[in-house]
Amino acid sequence: MPPESFPSFLADTSQHAKHWLFEAALPLWWERGADHQGGGFHEKIGQDGQPIGKPVRVRVQSRQTYVYARAGALGWTGPWQAAMRHGLSFMLSRYRRPDGLFRSTLDTADDSIDLYDQAFVLFALAHAYEAEGRPQELLDTAQTLLQQIEAALAHGDGGYYDGLPHQPILKSNPLMHLLEALLAWVAMGAEGNFRNAALALCELATTRLIQPASGAVGELFTTGWAPLGAPAERLYEPGHQFEWAYLLWQAQGLLGIQARDKALALENFGRFFGIDAARQVALFAVDEAGRPTDHRARLWAQTERLRTSLLFATQDLGDAAHSQAAVAGSYAGLARFLATEVPGLWHEWQREDGGFDLAPSPASSLYHLMTGLEGLLAPVAHLTPAALRPGHVERTITA
């Protein structure tokens, strides 16, 4: 599109995104997606608009807590605080272990620990902390959690195991989400262990996880953080390239590191190898040479492409024309996932032929949609301090 048309495109797209999120998705997932009798949020909503499955995973509770805390920050005038507190109180009371770590499910006999889930609890706590006026209790809970992550999961070569019991194969994805959570705390003004852990993860990512030849991050690694398997066997998810690019650029601003070149290389790999131009979607996976290995498309990869494209287009990163075209293409592709009979739902997977199989919408994906659409909403819904948001009531959270 001509550069002069981009501002008007953004304005129109912002209104469309705001309407879908504020008028359809957020009300639906609070009214029908929450278990108003038993607590917490349901796992899914069917395409008929009815909830499926009782609350089970802490991942869903933490992500929905974040979603509604962020909704308040973006100016949604619905019951964001009640919804946020609904998820937060359930998460703190039903999943927290005596040692300060969090169970992945409601099974109290399961002693396994998943770093991915700890990261999302930490992320939710950061946003709830800001939304509630920064109560000391939530900061203490987050600090204890981070200390326990360090004690239980820190790896001798840097980074972390992905859970307990420790496994010989290491994963980059949980590290990425832990970095996301740490940066959220740094953005709230937290220093000390939050900043130090974030700096260490950025150092690991830029020196070990990102492959020098391709500029991309793979998924699986050996115990020494070397890529696992032969080059032809290695998996690269385009959506994760966009996500890492976004986080490293965010880290440059928050931590003062130099990550511009790494962010550019990650976005370039994802954009050059990971996009189906005909369908306007980010593919699920490619190999180390950039050849597609899974032509399906998943919702979250579209939101990460949109978020990072918006960042690049508005922060003078890379080629402006490419970034603006990527914003337009990614939103067009994402809009197809949101075209459901019941507004506020979505399709999780797109087939290679561009069609969708009728399946429930998982609650965990609303987090991805919030992060992806936020860049469009911010220009039309300026962030406001927690105490000034509609419907805010001062209160200290207790489990």
Image: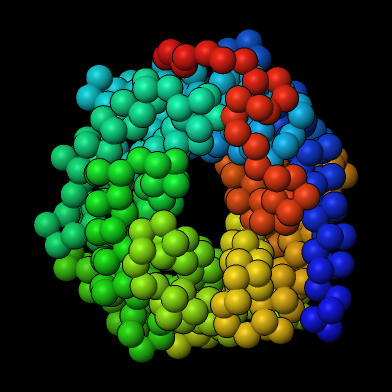
In the image, residue 158 above or below residue 2:
above
Camera-side residue of 125 and 108 = 125
For the point 61% across and 51% down, which residue is it?
371
The answer to whether 272 appears left or right of 216 in the picture is right
Q: Residue furthest left?
A: 156
Residue 215 in view (yes/no): yes
Q: Residue furthest top?
A: 37
In the image, residue 210 above or below residue 257:
below
The answer to whether 365 appears left or right of 91 in the picture is right
Residue 110 in view (yes/no): no
For the point 85% across and 53% down, which residue is it?
16
- Residue 327 is situated, as x and y percent measured from the top left of the image, at 72, 70
- Residue 9 is situated, as x and y percent measured from the top left of the image, at 84, 67
- Residue 296 is situated, as x and y percent measured from the top left of the image, at 63, 68
Camera-side residue of 265 and 335 = 265
- Residue 186 is situated, as x and y percent measured from the top left of the image, at 39, 46
Camera-side residue of 262 and 221 = 262
Quarter of the figure that contains the C terminus: top left
The answer to whether 396 appears left or right of 190 in the picture is right
Q: How many marks?
A: 0
What sort of colour scheme is used for the picture?
rainbow
In the image, residue 272 above or below residue 103:
below
- Quarter of the image for residue 77 reads top right
Quarter of the figure that contains the N terminus: bottom right
In the image, residue 99 above or below residue 279:
above
For the point 44% across and 62% down, which residue is it?
253
For the point 45% across and 27% down, which residue is it?
134
